[in-house]
Image: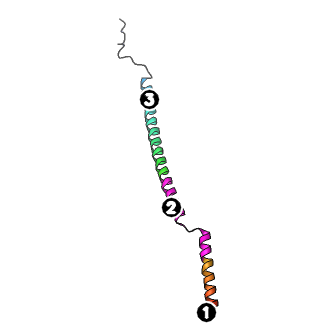
Amino acid sequence: MSRQADPAQKTHPHTHTYADLRHGLDVGLARTDGRMALLAQRSDQTDKDVTDLAARVAALEHARWPLPAVASLCALGALATTVWQAVGR
């Protein structure tokens, strides 16, 4: 009497290995997706920071005194002091 195995219970010998490989691949892809999402978020935050910094620099450049104007004011102050001293003596 030869006994044949039930085909429903017969599995391929590498079935567990394939399942482990697939699980490892799924976990690796999930990690990669998470890291890519984190990098995208950091990139967006960096873009926002750069935009804010550019706006601050533009405001500072707009509010600063131009060097020729400062030099002219100093020269006028020196001239006024010289004239005042010359007239006063």
Provide the secondary structure element on which disc 2 rests: helix
Q: CA distance from mark 3 to mark 2?
A: 55 Å
Q: Main secondary structure of the magenta part?
A: helix
Task: Tell me what residue is drawn at x 64 percent, y 90 percent.
Answer: 86
Left or right of 53? Residue 86 is right
Q: CA distance from mark 1 to mark 2?
A: 44 Å
Q: Amino acid at mark 2?
A: Ala
In the rendered image, the residue lying farthest to the bottom is 89
Q: Amino acid at mark 3?
A: Arg
Image quarter in which the N terminus is found = top left
Please tell me which of labels 1 and 2 falls first in the chain. 2
Crowding at mark 3 (Cα within 10 Å: few <14, some 14-19, many 20+): few
Query: Mark 1 and 2 residues: CB-CB less than 8 Å, in contact?
Result: no
Left or right of 4? Residue 50 is right
Q: Which residue is mark 2?
A: 59
Q: Which residue is mark 3?
A: 22
Provide the secondary structure element on which disc 3 rests: helix
Q: Amino acid at mark 1?
A: Gly
In the rendered image, the residue lying farthest to the front is 87
Crowding at mark 1 (Cα within 10 Å: few <14, some 14-19, many 20+): few
* x, y percent for residue 84: 61, 88
Task: Tell me what residue is drawn at x 63 percent, y 82 percent.
Answer: 79
Reply above or below: 40 against 25.
Answer: below
**Is 56 contained in the magenta span?**
yes
The magenta region covers: 49-73
Left or right of 7? Residue 79 is right
Task: Tell me what residue is drawn at x 50 percent, y 61 percent.
Answer: 59
Quadrant housing residue 24: top left
Q: Which residue is mark 1?
A: 88
In the rendered image, the residue lying farthest to the top is 1
Reply above or below: 20 against 36.
Answer: above
